[in-house]
Image (spheres, grey):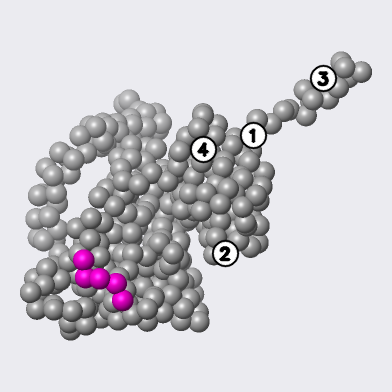
């Protein structure tokens, strides 16, 4: 009698199983993953419902048995944000996720680490209305500036009274005879710490049905303002509106730009196709230069860093206004040494 070789009897079924049970189905499903998922999800759902009573019984026994036998084993630690980002990168490179999908997921994961301070609008850039001004100026903020909500104060941001929305202002405009009459229509303003996590603030925005809060430091001093739009933009990217049309830089040549201090580092990296390292995770060029100088640099300050020359053209006592930036072409040391010997 013919007795097949062990490798043939074991290898052929294994090869057929891998080929027809794993490789071919997965390759077909991978090319048409959305169609395959929609088609198979119907059957999987009903199979899961039918087998749920049996699965529940088996899970009950196996869980209790594993607790009794493996109580001394450590529980697996949950995945860290870094590990999730690595997995996300692998999914994107492998074609499991589209680039835009991966970008949105990565943006949401960054909310776990980002602080409010990193995304907020600085105090100097807050658009607010002082009751000492005329009512027409408030209307201009809504009509000309395109603001939907404006912070209202008395004498400055140190005395905030509340927030007035464009909807409430124009709805009750006939009842407002003088500026004091605005006060009953103000919404209560909420304050959050600049060290608060952005993910926690996002949850509060939705829980309280809010879209704007003021940011304070450890001493209770207002340092900025952050909106729901700011957080959403950090996840899905820029949301263009009428207020985003301002260009914060002028390009003098391929390697030279003149910017405002509010020019974002992300935009800088996009313009020059480089990565500018900031130890304090500063968001703007002004913040980066303050970090490097250790104080607010005044006009005339120069810094050569990471292949760029930064020259402060104008500055106030509390912020940088204009900066000249030039890409510096570095000469290779070997070439410089060779040139020296040739000249010698």
Query: Residue 344 lies in magenta, yes or no?
Result: no
Earlier residue among tags 2 and 4: 4
Which x, y percent locates residue 173? Answer: 11, 72
Q: Which residue is mark 3?
A: 339
Earlier residue among tags 4 and 3: 4
Q: Residue at x 57, y 64 (%)?
A: 317
Which x, y percent locates residue 58? Answer: 23, 68
Q: Which residue is mark 4?
A: 257
* Residue 168 in the image: above or below residue 251: below
Q: Which residue is mark 1?
A: 328
Q: Secondary structure at mark 2?
A: loop
Q: Nearer the viewer, mark 1 or mark 2?
A: 2
* Residue 186 in the image: above or below residue 242: below
In-front residue for pair 37/116: 116
Q: Please report contact status of discs 2 and 3: CB closer than 8 Å, yes or no.
A: no
Q: Secondary structure at mark 4?
A: strand
Magenta residue span:
132-136
Q: Please report contact status of discs 1 and 3: CB closer than 8 Å, yes or no.
A: no
Tell me the CA gap for discs 2 and 4: 23 Å
Q: Nearer the viewer, mark 4 or mark 1?
A: 4
Image quarter of residue 112: bottom left
Q: Residue at x 46, y 81 (%)?
A: 220
Q: Residue furthest top?
A: 342
Q: Which residue is mark 2?
A: 317
Q: Residue at x 61, y 52 (%)?
A: 299
Which x, y percent locates residue 90? Answer: 41, 43
Q: Secondary structure at mark 3?
A: helix
Earlier residue among tags 2 and 3: 2
Q: Is residue 281 visible?
A: no
């Amino acid at each position: 009698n013919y007795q097949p070789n062990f490798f043939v009897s074991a290898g052929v079924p294994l090869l057929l199983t891998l080929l027809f049970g794993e490789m071919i189905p997965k390759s077909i499903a991978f090319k048409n993953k959305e169609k395959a998922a929609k088609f198979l999800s119907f059957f999987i759902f009903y199979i899961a419902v039918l087998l749920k009573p049996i699965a529940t019984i088996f899970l009950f026994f196996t869980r209790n048995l594993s607790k009794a036998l493996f109580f001394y084993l450590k529980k697996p630690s949950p995945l860290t944000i870094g590990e999730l980002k690595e997995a996300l990168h692998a999914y994107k490179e492998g074609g499991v996720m589209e680039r835009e999908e991966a970008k949105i997921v990565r943006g949401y994961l960054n909310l776990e680490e980002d602080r409010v301070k990193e995304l907020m609008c600085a105090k100097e850039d807050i658009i607010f209305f002082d009751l000492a001004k005329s009512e027409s100026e408030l209307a201009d903020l809504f009509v000309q500036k395109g603001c939907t909500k404006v912070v209202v104060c008395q004498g400055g941001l140190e005395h905030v009274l509340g927030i007035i929305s464009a909807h409430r202002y124009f709805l009750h405009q006939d009842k407002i005879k003088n500026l004091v009459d605005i006060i009953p229509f103000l919404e209560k303003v909420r304050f959050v710490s600049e060290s608060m996590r952005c993910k926690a603030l996002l949850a509060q925005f939705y829980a309280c049905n809010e879209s704007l809060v003021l940011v304070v430091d450890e001493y209770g001093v207002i340092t900025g303002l952050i909106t729901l739009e700011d957080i959403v933009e950090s996840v899905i990217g820029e949301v263009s509106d009428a207020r985003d049309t301002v260009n914060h830089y002028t390009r003098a040549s391929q390697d030279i730009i003149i910017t405002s201090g509010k020019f974002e580092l992300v935009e800088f990296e996009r313009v020059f196709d480089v990565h500018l390292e900031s130890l304090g995770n500063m968001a703007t060029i002004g913040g980066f230069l303050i970090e490097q100088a250790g104080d607010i640099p005044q006009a005339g300050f120069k810094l050569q860093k990471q292949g760029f020359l930064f020259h402060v053209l104008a500055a106030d006592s509390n912020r940088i206004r204009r900066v000249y930036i030039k890409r510096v072409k570095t000469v290779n040391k070997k070439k410089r040494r060779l040139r020296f010997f040739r000249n010698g």
